[in-house]
Image (cartoon, rainbow, N blue to C red):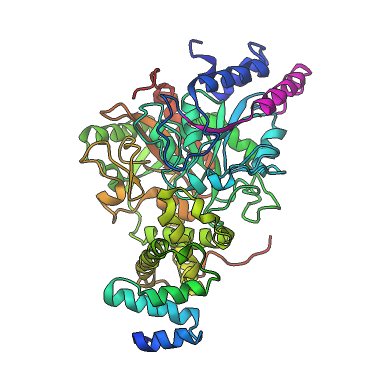
Amino acid sequence: MKLNRRQFTKAAGTGSIALAVAWQQACSEVAESGQVSTETVEVLLDSQGPRGIYQEAEEFERLRRAVGSMIRTQTNLRNFSVDEDEQPSTVFWRR
Amino acid sequence: MSEPIYFRSVRELAEGLEKREFSSLELTELYLERSQELDVPPFDLPNEPREDHDGKLATMITIATDHALEAARVADKELAAGNRRSILHGIPYGVKDILDTTGIRTTWGSRIFKDRIPDRNATPIDKLEQAGAVLMAKMAMGEFAGGNTSTALNPWKLDRTSFGSSSGTVSAAVAGLIGFGVGTETGGSIVYPASAVGASGLRPTFGRVSRFGCMALSWSLDKIGPVGRSAEDCGHVLEQIAGYDPKDNSTGQQTFEFRVDPGNMRGKKLGVCRAEFELSASVATRKIFQEVLDAFEQMGVEIQDISFPQRPTGALFSTLVTVESGTNFKSLFDDGRIKEMFSFNEDRAAGWMAGRMMPASDYLTAQRIRNQIRREADQLVSQFDAVIAPTWPNGAALREVRDGWPVPARPEWEPPNEINSATPKLNSIGNLVGHPGLAIPCGFDEDGLPLSVQIVSSAWNDQSTLDFGMAYQRETDWHLQRPPFPWRQ
């Protein structure tokens, strides 16, 4: 689901944006413009707890670039065709 | 024997102790004096790469003088009583400052933890203590085991990188400041610095060595391994630190008994990652790498070119490390200490926070792709006794860092990812799938900087990896070359 900027800002203001929706929004923004908007990064950041050092504009900008980079990396993996029978290398096991 | 004592191999040092040519205390004092003379420990960790090294190496963060002298005295008493615990008994060593050591500060290479003094040993430290080895120093490293941010200089030329992140450990081993070392690797942090300084360094099979008490950069990728002046050194150390540990659920039940003699190599099969042999822009360097293959052929080894399928290894590695690091270092963000990281690591910290935001489904997708690569790599590598590629395409680059990479010493020499990002890298694959990898020196580039090849075998076949390294070093003397002193500027 891709929200337009107004819908996203409004929903974010009510705190009703789920992390997964915000991440998908970020992915859509990177696909369209190559970068993630400030509003979307703020929602993603607030989902992690207090903003901490990212209250500072310079640090926030650094984070915004990092999120964009992460999404471009992730796109490489999402585009990779993995066999449906493939399990992750994190399967819980007992000795 | 003309080699100075401080450059001797583990076996030679053990023989010297056994024959009472020197005591453990004398040996420890020798290494301590040499370190005081040639090394300047960064007692206050700098916030930028240091320039005040004054021609010294800066491979050590903390020199544990009192601890080392006491441990050496105990070793001498036990050796005199005929109670020899292992071949390492009485030999001083340095460990990357990422493993906890009781009562000796452990900084993880960061100012944030400059006063952190653990009340426990990491499991490999306990095992080395049981083996009678003498802990002498905590070695310089890239901050939080990341990249090329160590203070340690390269003894072959001080303006060159010793890479990261186990750089202090490898530089000290090559400079004869320690008997042997222990480093860690997530994506190349043993083999890359070993390549830069001409050390022998082994990344063991994932799960071979317990990581309990070691800082976690990536739970699913971190490995701990030995560093020395020969492949045989690495084998002796691995034998002592390997083994199952209930405190690290990644460790396997497989035991490791080191066999010193590699035996006859005739008929053994060596897979060659040919594309990586062509990555260097230097014809002379490519020729040196080819001579390694020629040497194995002369031993009767059967050589066959191989290629791994192209897979998104870079994206995969980046995803796993940033998500896991971001999760592990959450408290640094919560209390604001993350702000104290080195300035050139700010982008890395932001990446960790971005990693925390990634949905779990994407992380699991990455681990599914990794599993596919593991099956493919296992299938290919298991057809050979070992596979081989240059550890790094060129000699050590300049210490200056740009975009997270050392700057090439010559304009035409670029880091491998820039040369050809599509080339599957043996090192990336080996780290992702947990195969053992041994870096050994194999010559010098036009600037006199060491070159190195990495030998990789199937999981749990660490001995096979070491066999190829020892066989090569039986026929060549690159591992016996020492950096000229005074160090070249």
Residue B199 on image: x %, y %? 45, 31
State the residue lying farthest toward the right: B81
In this rendering, does residue B374 appear at all? no
Front one among B231 and A5: A5
Q: Against B369, is B201 above or below? A: above
Front one among A66 and B1: A66
Q: Against B305, is A11 above or below? A: below
B463 sits left or right of A25 in the view? right
The magenta-colored residue range is B58-85
Identified at 67% across, 18% down, the residue is B25
Residue A41 on image: x %, y %? 42, 73
Q: Against B173, is B367 above or below? A: below
Q: How many numbered tags mark residues here?
A: 0
B331 sits left or right of B389 in the view? right
Q: Is residue B80 magenta?
A: yes
Front one among B220 and B240: B220
Q: Is residue B484 magenta?
A: no
Residue B176 on image: x %, y %? 50, 23
In this rendering, does residue B32 appear at all? yes
**Looking at the rendering, in which quadrant would you find the C terminus of chain B?**
top left
Identified at 33% across, 40% down, the residue is B400
Q: Against A35, is B430 above or below? A: above
Displayed quadrant of residue B224: top right
Residue B15 on image: x %, y %? 62, 17
Front one among B114 and B297: B114
B111 sits left or right of B257 in the view? left
State the residue lying farthest toward the front: A56
